[in-house]
Image (tube, helix red, strand yellow):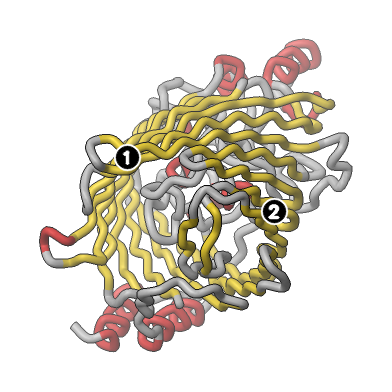
Amino acid sequence: MSRKPLARAVAEHFTPSSGHRFWLGLTLLAVAAAPLAAQADDVEEESWGVHGQATYIWQKKPSFDAAYSGTNSLSSAAEKGYSFSGTLFLGLRPWTGGELYFNPEVVQAVPMSGLTGLGGMMDSEQQKGSSPNPTFYRARLFLRQTWGFGGGQQALESAPNQLAGMVDKRRLVVTLGNLSIIDIFDSNAYAHDGRTQFLNWALSTYGPYDYAGDTRGYTWGGAAEYYYDDWVLRAGRFMVPLESNGQRLDTRITKYHSDQVELEHDHVIGGQPGKVRLLAFRSKEIMGSFSDALAYAALNGGTPDVALVRKERIKYGYGINLEQSLGNDIGVFARLSRNDGKTETYSFSEIERSVTAGVSVKGSSWHRDNDTVGFAVIQNGLSKAHQEDLAAGGLGVFIGDGQLNYRPERIMEAYYSYSLSKAVSLTADVQRFYNPAYNADRGPVTVGSLRLRAEF
């Protein structure tokens, strides 16, 4: 099928509203116009680079059974939602070893149920400040400096926020500026990018990793990475929001901050490469604790509210991240993570324990080299204190049904990414949620998605 008929068929089938028809049209235009990616035999050093992406995600769920609903419940009625993002990745090499990057971005979205009702959210492109109107902003502005110490060389291909060139295997890389923490920490070859891989938030990184960021997921700070043969050690400090889940960042980075450290090891098993990553984080913020909120409500009446008991507190957590190639076309991954579960969610998802695992398969065996099939399972959980807070009627940023019959939230996700060209893909995705927002009295529910993506 040619690009033009397929683009027309997608547009006619989904009949988008006037509020987002323009962005779907822009993505479809990129589909028709995007050139095939160039293949280079040799890696030559780039002095500058320009890349871009446009991603449109359409989602729908049917009605489902729910014994009751609360303020932050996933609606039991049938719903539709969508998200659009467009990004330019502009890079410049101002001096030897230096790289400067700037990413202007535009987003527009209408989430289902106002982005509430789940621990593992269904679309990692959705933001807490989602709006049906296009919003333009600076996503990233950062400087990267690399010092080489020998040990042989390896090639870096041209990519978004990566200039092509040769680097030493033993090197120190320092990054300073405005970016997302998970641009540097907790990468995974098979589950990290909701624009090309799995959609669920809990598969883009550790669910309990309450990594600092504004409502769009970006912050300011710095990180250092030391590469030594098969090992990488990373550490970084970043600004936290001025208030829980707020857009403004607290510039007092010496007083309030988020620290993380990660150790990565590359290995080969049975001739196939893999990686193991261990991460720990510690954040100092003005937060409310669940136990204090319960005690305050018991003393003064009403339902627990963490906003009434906020003070300077520490949150910490850790995780292990595994990825392993099983052949040229298949790879598996897993993450295990948790945080202390004492305080409110400050920046990311309402998950305090999480186990995820999955598989990714390329389409070479059926003569579709650039297609990908993925399947993953997720189990998310809450601390005992958080369970009691919700059972008493407490509300989080994203969850709160008014009461709670606690069960771990379980999710299955599968996708097929169909390559229209080396620059354009169309993905069909399905997610099945059991015990949404950890409540056995609600669900299960199935969410279907279509994702159209173009890049250059």
Q: Give residue 324's mark.
A: 1
Name which residue type carries label 2: Thr
Asked if residue 240 lies left or right of residue 151, the reply is: right
Residue 136 visible to the viewer: no
Which part of the image, by quadrant, shows the C terminus? bottom left
Q: Amino acid at mark 1?
A: Gln
- Asked whether 96 or 38 is in front, the reply is 96
Q: Nearer the viewer, residue 18 or 312?
A: 312
- In front here: 211 or 382? 211
User: What is the crowding at mark 1: few (fewer than 14 residues within 10 Å), some, or many (at least 20)?
Assistant: many
Quarter of the figure with the N terminus: bottom left
Apparent side of residue 105 relative to residue 433 in the rendered image (left or right) = right
362 lies above or below 116? below
| Residue labelled with disc 2 | 175
Sequence order check, earlier mark of 1 and 2: 2
Label 1, secondary structure: give it.
strand
Residue at the image position 38 percent from the left and 51 percent from the top = 198
* CA separation in Å, label 1 and label 2: 27 Å
Local SS, label 2: strand
- State whether residue 262 is above or below residue 292: below
Q: Which residue appears at 75% of the width and 24% of the height?
A: 314
Residue 63 place in picture, x, y as percent:
34, 48
